[in-house]
Amino acid sequence: MRRLKRKDSRKYLRSVVAMSELTVQDARSIIEEQIETLKKRNKEPEWMTKLRYKAMDAFFEAPHNDPIIKDPLDYIAKAEEEMYPEVKSLDELPPEMLALLDRLGIADVEKKYIAGLAVQSDTSIVLNDFLKEWRKKGLIVESMEDAVRNHPIVKDLFLKQFNPYESKLAAYHTAVWNGGIFLHVAQGLKVPMPLHLFFLIQNSAMAQAPHIIIHAEPNSEIHLIEGCTSPVLVRHSLHLDMTEAYIGDGANVKLSVLQNWPEYVHTRPMTRARIGKNAEFINTTVGLGTGKSNIANPKYWVDEGGYVELNGIILGQKDFYVDLGGEMNLDALGARGLNASKSVIMDKSSVITRGLIRANAPKTKGHISCDALILNPEARMETYPGLISQVDDAELSHEAAIGKIREEELFYLMSRGLKEEEATQLIVKGFVNPLLKDIPVEFVVEIRKIIEMAVSGGM
Amino acid sequence: MMLQIKNLEVEVENKKIINSLNLSVGKGEFHVIMGPNGSGKSTLALTLMGHPNYKITNGKIEFDGKVINDIPVDERARMGMFLAFQHPEDVEGVKIIDYLRLLLEKVKGIEPAKALQIIPSKAKEVWFSADMLSRYINVGFSGGERKRFEILQALLIKPKLLILDEPDSGVDIDSLSLISHKIRELYEQGTSILLITHYGRILEHIDPKIVRVHIMKDGHIVMSGKEELVEKIEKEGFKKVFEECGCNE
């Protein structure tokens, strides 16, 4: 890997890789090289390196089924096409990222954080002091690389909800995962303000696969906000993040993921969660910039009296392809699940939602709701709700409403003097608003701005 | 003339609803249109505002000296026209306060900070508390709340011409009285009024001497007069009035 000299710091380089000639053998050696680099760089324990190699073998055997990415081999060498120089301070960030941080009021992040993980609380920057203090109480927030070395428990949690043989993309992630967070909340610990996490990914060919583990012990509480401000400093074309959440009995965890990808990237977020007895997991995903394509099928297993909620907000733009699934397994008495999505679809984009709820135990309840607002005749929406009941006394239901903006509603707002664009923006923001209930206000402001720009661009 | 309607003919879904309708509303005048159901009153209101489903097949509408037949609704609004709807639309997810702030900014050029001072005090005048302002536009509103919210928007915008389509339908007695008061307030501030109604009750707080009344039937105006026309209709009903005037022929 070449590094730019300091004086070139605003530019990025393009490394030329001949794509068409890549053979399986080439791919194997590229992945091997990546694994070896990571092993050394991270000083990984042996079990992790073994896991990576196992996943590499799996990569060549596992099935692959993706409507957009026909051949994952194409993306392996492409992992690093363009990259920014190493960033040591905020001043060296690309201007568009600085502007984003600025708008969110977090441009004052301490310079020492910039090399790795930056954490922000609801209203102000979480200083080192904050994490130190909460660390004493039992909150661990560490980069995944550090956590793998520092906490034996990670071995019991890492890749326990996925199997590398299930798909080529899961296997590739596992082989070359890099970056990500380990979040551990001790039993009974309630963290009162949301933790905002964003990563700075730089100077790594394999930086496209962060691994996140959320380990909430019984009766703990936390709200984690991920992304949105994730400045990806390496330009790559495939992003594969994996999240494994373990929600202990009686715990209450919110995970809000704000995706705002550049339009050249394909994203395949993989999320799974086990929800304990009487525990609650609220998973909100806001796909504002979904990238060229975004396919996700989060899976959840809910124990007795537990509750899971998947709120999906999707903004389909340009020719983007978005496919949001969501499998909920209600495995014990009284478990409940809600899969609610709201999509705004414009230009020539396609959005598919396919929630699936399985009632595997008595007195379980599940509901799928899918609303879509279609702004252009060329935009496309499909929805496939799935309800499977293995028992007699489960309550499963679904509803879907797909439509255009109502003419009368638009006329009403325009009759007060709002232009068509302004009225449409208002209606679209109103449409997604109910699902933004758990998102802190500064992010909601940012989300609304992005929606406004998208609507204007689409008109 | 604030509003001049000449020989207007309007079709909805290829059906002629309004024909040879003539009406002039001068600056600072107060006009009332009455008429039985189906006489075309609401069609007139929506046509004046430029609803795309109402096609003008003949005649013209002038506002402030300009023919507005082909001018879109939002431009008409910015020229100073305002329609208080008979059935105001629900707008899910949009908080009243956010909407009104945007409206004042975009339409009146009022800074958001200033708007945030103006809105709550005006809202209070039509019995909208701070809590009400964070509700979604018209969602779950009672009849009275809907109509009072229409009036609130008119009070904030202060239009040159206020068209009210049955501001009294589905409204409780107290709201009715308040709305009547507020219409007078706008009138006194110089807004021209075109009020569509079934009943005289809404005129409770309006000086009878200023009111000009028009009766609509089958898509045009068949009678015009003063306030006593309202009393006559309230007492005798449209049927008898039409028989007497020979308007049924």
Image (tube, helix red, strand yellow):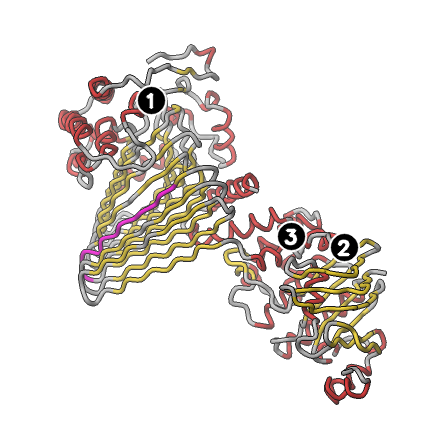
Q: Quadrant of the C terminus of chain A?
A: top right
**A222 is higher (above) or lower (below) than B173:** above
- The chain under label 2 reads B
**Residue under the point 30% across and 20% down:** A77
Looking at the rendering, which quadrant does residue A214 occupy?
top left
Quadrant where the N terminus of chain A is found in the figure? top left
Foreground residue among A116 and B249 = B249
Tell me the element at label 3.
helix
In this rendered view, identify the residue nearer to me: A8 or A137.
A8
Asked if one can make out residue B122 in the rendered structure from this viewpoint, the answer is no
Q: Amino acid at mark 3?
A: Leu
Question: How far apart in space, not on screen, are marks 2 and 1 (Cα)?
Answer: 59 Å
Please state the extent of the stretch shown in magenta in the rendering. A322-333
Q: Tell me if mark 2 has few (under 14), some (14-19) or many (20+) residues whose alpha carbon lies within 10 angstroms of its own.
A: some
Q: Amino acid at mark 1?
A: Lys
Residue B84 coordinates in the image, percent (x, y): 67, 65
For discs 2 and 1, the disc positioned in front in the rendered view: 2
Q: Disc 3 designates what residue? A: B103
